[in-house]
Each structure stands twice: as C-alpha cells, then as structure tokens.
Image (spheres, grey):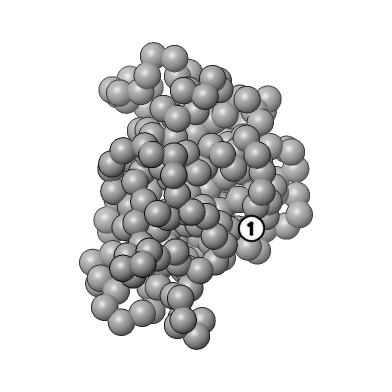
Amino acid sequence: MRITVFGATGNVGSRVVAEALTRGHRVTAVVRDPAKPHGLPSATALAVGDARDPEDVARIATGQNVVITATRPLPGSEHELAVATRGLLAGIAGTGVRLLAVGGAGSLLVPGGGGTALVDSPGFPEEIRPIALACGEQFDLYRAAGPEVDWTYLSPAAVLEPGVRTGRFRTGRDELLVDAAGDSAISMEDLAVALLDEAERPAHRRARFTAAY
C-alpha cells in the first residue's frame, strides 16, 4: 500500500514508519521543514506539509491508500491537537483515503467503573491530564465527522513506552484492557503492529479500538 504518516519523526510515528516499511509498503513521511534532520530510514519518501492545513492534507493524500497521524503537541500546546485534527478531517473528507489516528487512552472506560473514563478515575496523573483531555477532544472530533471520512482511532493502553516488538497483544473497543494484575500496557513497537494490522485488514471503520497486553 501507499501510506503517508503525519508525526513520522515522533516516538510512535517513527515506529509506525519502520513497521510499514518492514511489511513492504511505500511510506511517505510528512515534515514541515525538509532541511531539518529527521532520522528516518532512507527508504522513506518525504512530503512537505502541515496537518493543520486542509489543502496540504488533501494534496498529500492524493494517490495514497492510507493516511496515518501520530502527531503529539509539545507540553503547553495541547490545544494544537484539535487544530491539527480539524485540518486532517477537512483535508481527507471525500478523498476516499482512509485516515488512521493514534490517540490517547484517557477516554477509554475503566473496567467495572460504571462508565467512568480513565482520565476521570481516582489517581489519574495530573501532569498528563492536559494531553489526555486534548486527546479526548480529538476523539470527539472523529466521532462527529461525517460519512465522507473513513476513519479509525486507536487508543493505546494506559502505559505506552518504548520496548520490543512481540506481535502478541489483545484488542478491544472502548474499554481499557488490563491484565490479571490490573496493569494496562503496550510497547510502542507493538502499537505500531496493531495499527498496521488495521491498515491491512480493516476491522474498525469509523470506530475506535484499543490494544494492550
């Protein structure tokens, strides 16, 4: 497939690029400044653009099978996530290109919590509340998108860290996945596997899913 990745130089995005290339897909990474070092594999094509600009998104999406977004704003700029989401949705609308988004875990429902979202549960870390709330707004924008956008939203486990690629994990829908000890985690490498599995074999069109060990 022809896959374009926004946020390709980030922690998750770079692993998505690597996983897609390993599977033989043609990958284009979107960068704002091509002169800056990006550290991406040499097999990656580059496109210059901004997720916040619908015209850029529409231009870059032309001829692609899938657009993946794994963008994350810097601390203090969490509001930019909604701006980028609106740009992506507007630019993709009507193109027929699938849009896969890596979101946050905060909006997942706590098992046995009576409908309580993770971000609203006791003990949720205050330092990550701003990005969790921003991701919640991001998810709301996807859910409000019209039928002209073919989207999928992937919420990771509660703990998402660099690790190893095992290819072994569980998937679910809107509820946080936890193991027998009550922990919820997945490596960034395996999250990339889950995302590329969805790109190759769509199972959650216009819906959210989650992945965890």
Q: Quadrant of the N terminus?
A: top right
Q: Which residue is at a point 44% across and 14% down the rendered structure image?
A: 43
Q: Secondary structure at mark 1?
A: strand
Total marks placed? 1
Which corner quadrant of the image does residue 172 belong to?
bottom right
Q: Nearer the viewer, residue 171 or 25?
A: 171
Counting from the top left corner in percent of width and height, residue 40 is at 35, 23
Q: Which residue is at a point 52% across and 42% down the rendered structure image?
A: 195
In this picture, is 32 found above or below 172? above
**In the visual, does 74 lie left or right of 150?**
left
Q: Residue furthest bottom?
A: 114
In this picture, is 148 found above or below 201? below
Q: Which residue is at a point 46% across and 81% down the rendered structure image?
A: 112
Residue 194 seen anywhere in this rendered image of the structure:
yes
Counting from the top left corner in percent of width and height, residue 69 is at 50, 42
Q: From the image, tell me which residue sits under label 1.
A: 207
Residue 70 seen anywhere in this rendered image of the structure:
no
Q: Which residue is at a point 44% across and 44% down the rendered structure image?
A: 168
Q: Residues within 10 Å of mark 1 (few under 14, many from 20)?
A: some
Counting from the top left corner in percent of width and height, residue 99 is at 61, 43
